[in-house]
Image (tube, rainbow, N blue to C red):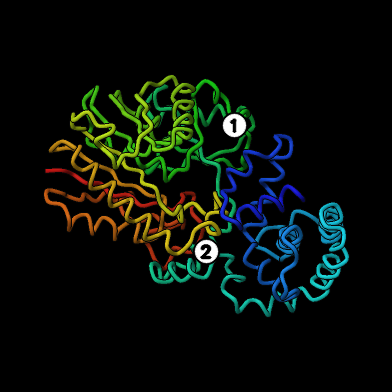
Amino acid sequence: MLQVADAVQAVRTGRSLTEVLARCPADLRPGTQSLSFYVLRQLGAAEAARQHLAPKAPPPKVEPLLLSALALLWPGAEERPYADHTVVDQVVSAVRKRAPASAGFVNAVLRRFLREREAIVLALAAQPQALFNHPLWWIEQLQKDWPQQWQAILKANNQHPPMTLRVNARRSSPEAATSAYLQRLTAAGIAARPVGPLAPQALVLDRAVPVSALPGFAEGDVSVQDAAAQLAAPLLLQAGLPAGARVLDACSAPGGKTVHLLELADLDLLALDSDASRLERVQDNLKRLGLKAETRAADARDTAKWWDGRLFDAILLDAPCSASGIVRRHPDVRWLRRPTDIANLAQIQADLLDALWLTLKPGGRLVYATCSIFKAEGQAQIDAFLQRQNGVNAQEVEGVTGHLLPLAHNGDEAAATEPSQLDGFYYALLLKS
């Protein structure tokens, strides 16, 4: 519990859970991640319950332990991982190790919560942050952007994400490779199903497994990538590019879309990323899959420092964003973001679009993508770009371009109520005349 509480507190103070887990001892990491994800999905309710039960905040060493316990005791959508008495005993024991004088206080608060749980849950249901487990500003933004679907989106955000694979199309055609790999999974006792024609290389597992259990993973036969992210490469390449076409992946880390492009076509590809450490993951992906691309650490906006003046045939701009479409996969994101972040990120996205458009040859194509469902980072961003730039034609591709919500029946507002196999994304295909 101490590792979980430390992870939760780190997120509450602005640190990424991914960063925290990377520093967690390897033998404790899987359990810490699982419990941290659970707590973060219930953190809004836990914070409201703590304020209800103990209006004066406990010491900093104690509060994250208390919050973790309340989250684990809260009656959530998923089955609680531990029995009530186990949670109380474990957390009180952890408090005794860290702040012995507070053990009695924590024990009393938790036992009161168990006695009054039904009434407390009912009383706090009027608080949106407790009911939906998202910050209030986030809820209000979704209400504005998606007035028909906002509640369904919030509900979907608190579900477990599917584990989705991308079968390496270099082994044969995408359809044949996917069918053959599905048979290999079945033989290995791993149940999976195809996503369908929208993402022909995608297979969704019935249950997540370690990548080491995937047949041929080390050899590059398959990768882990959400189906929505698998739409980027085919969208950029759909009209076909000649062998050796010059392509830029402008914000490439961790490299899933980079290698997908190279699985589908022979390209002269430059993979940029402003973070040199994250660029190492791109290089690792290229090595595992036996693919080649030039990689360079650079801010794509500063073309004077990395561009040699040769125009690109195609550009993929998977721009930095709020990650509001992948909250179920990264439950810490909702607690890390601040309202001002959206405007700041939208400005970065606009700067990237303007800078990279100048490096694209006439007749070329640019795919703009964000893993966001906020309209400021999607349709509003592209609408503004079309107003600023001449010679831009935005081409629609049914089922792909526009906002993809993490809901089934995305295009039907009345039916879009259940979680989807796909993460939330936005895609635009821009042609240069």
Q: Nearer the viewer, residue 149 or 41?
A: 41
Residue 50 x, y percent position in the rendering: 71, 70
- Name the quadrant containing residue 265: top left
Dot 2 alpha-carbon crowd within 10 angstroms: few under 14, some 14 to 19, many 20 or more:
many
- Name the quadrant containing residue 75: bottom right
Q: Amino acid at mark 2?
A: Leu
Dot 1 alpha-carbon crowd within 10 angstroms: few under 14, some 14 to 19, many 20 or more:
some
For the point 43% across and 68% down, the residue is: 141
Identify residue for label 2. 154
Q: Secondary structure at mark 1?
A: helix
Of the residues under marks 2 and 1, which one precedes in the sequence?
A: 2
Residue 414 drawn above or below residue 206: below
Residue 235 x, y percent position in the rendering: 30, 41
Give yes or no for contact between labels 2 and 1 (Cβ–Cβ under 8 Å). Answer: no
215 displayed left or right of 200: right
Residue 285 disc label: none
Q: Secondary structure at mark 2?
A: helix
Residue 197 x, y percent position in the rendering: 38, 42
For the point 44% across and 19% down, the residue is: 290
8 displayed left or right of 90: left
Residue 211 disc label: 1
